[in-house]
Image: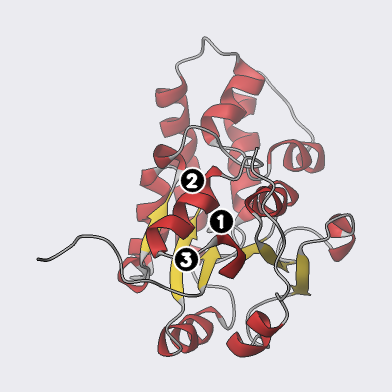
Amino acid sequence: MGSSAPALAHRAFLFDMDGTIVDNMAFHTTSWLAFFERHGHVLDADAFFRDTAGRQGREIIAKYLGEDADHASLLAEKEVVYRELYGPHLATVAGFDALIASARRDGVGLVVGTAAPDENIAFTLDGLDLRHRFDAIVGAADVERGKPHPDVFLKGAQLAGALPQHCIVFEDAPLGVEAARRAGMRVVVLTTTLPAEAFAAFDNVIAIVPDFSALDVDALFASVAPALAPHHQ
């Protein structure tokens, strides 16, 4: 009898999307600032990023425009601004395609775990013809709680058929690193968005790199033993 369950992946890579697969966080910040300025809020770019990186769009809108705001229509408005700004620059971070090709040859499961809405996932992954390269894609619509809660990574690991301690997460934001820590997963940090010092407090970071080009699949997994115990919250 056939089954819809995925084949067991003994190891898995989980990738945040924005700022990790693509180096786009400056465009997100710029589009958020332009959006909020239209709605009467002039915000400092650095403070805004520190306060919101890794959070879902509806959380950001609620923070600045209130819980009673029309989150869906406002988020759609902001995403139009973002796509207009970033569309001409859409590209993967250096070394990403080679790393996932190597991982696939080694039987490593591949997952996207992002705070982005479905429309943004489609814009990025379909725009780069990447969707078919992944075993699972988990976005804002698939979990109740965004990062730093571990839900997005735990669900991604489950869909890939991998235990949390056999997963490595790729992230660019402290909230995402904390989400991985709570899930019991080790992290490779990309400094596309923040300098290495921003991650000094985390004990689950195994590497900090500017891009994917120097990473080796076997070396990464050799560095995760013994794995962290889960910190589910």
Foreground label between 1 and 3: 3
Q: Residue at x 44, y 70 (%)?
A: 110
Q: Which mark is residue 70?
A: none
Residue 171: x and y in percent read 65, 61
Number of residues whose C-alpha sits closer than 10 Å to that of mark 1, classed few (under 14), some (14–19) or many (20 or more): many
Q: Which mark is residue 18?
A: 1
Disc 3 + disc 2, Cβ < 8 Å:
no
> Closer to the N terminus: mark 3 or mark 2?
2
Number of residues whose C-alpha sits closer than 10 Å to that of mark 3, classed few (under 14), some (14–19) or many (20 or more): many
Relative to 157, residue 40 above or below: above
Horizontally, residue 14 falls left or right of residue 175, namely left
**Would you identify the image quadrant in which residue 51 lies?**
top right
Three-letter amino acid code of the residue under disc 1: Asp
Residue 134: x and y in percent read 37, 68
Number of residues whose C-alpha sits closer than 10 Å to that of mark 2, classed few (under 14), some (14–19) or many (20 or more): many
Looking at the figure, which quarter contains the C terminus?
A: top right
**Would you identify the image quadrant in which residue 39 lies?**
top right
Disc 3 marks which residue? 162
Q: Residue at x 48, y 80 (%)?
A: 100
Q: How is the image coloured?
A: secondary structure
Q: Which mark is residue 116?
A: 2
Horizontally, residue 78 falls left or right of residue 60, namely left
Three-letter amino acid code of the residue under disc 2: Ala
Label 1 SS: loop
Real-space CA distance between mark 3 and mark 2, rounded to the nearest whole angstrom: 23 Å
Residue 209: x and y in percent read 75, 75
Real-space CA distance between mark 1 and mark 3, rounded to the nearest whole angstrom: 23 Å
Disc 1 + disc 2, Cβ < 8 Å:
yes
Three-letter amino acid code of the residue under disc 3: Ala
Q: Residue at x 57, y 31 (%)?
A: 35
Visible residue check, residue 114: no
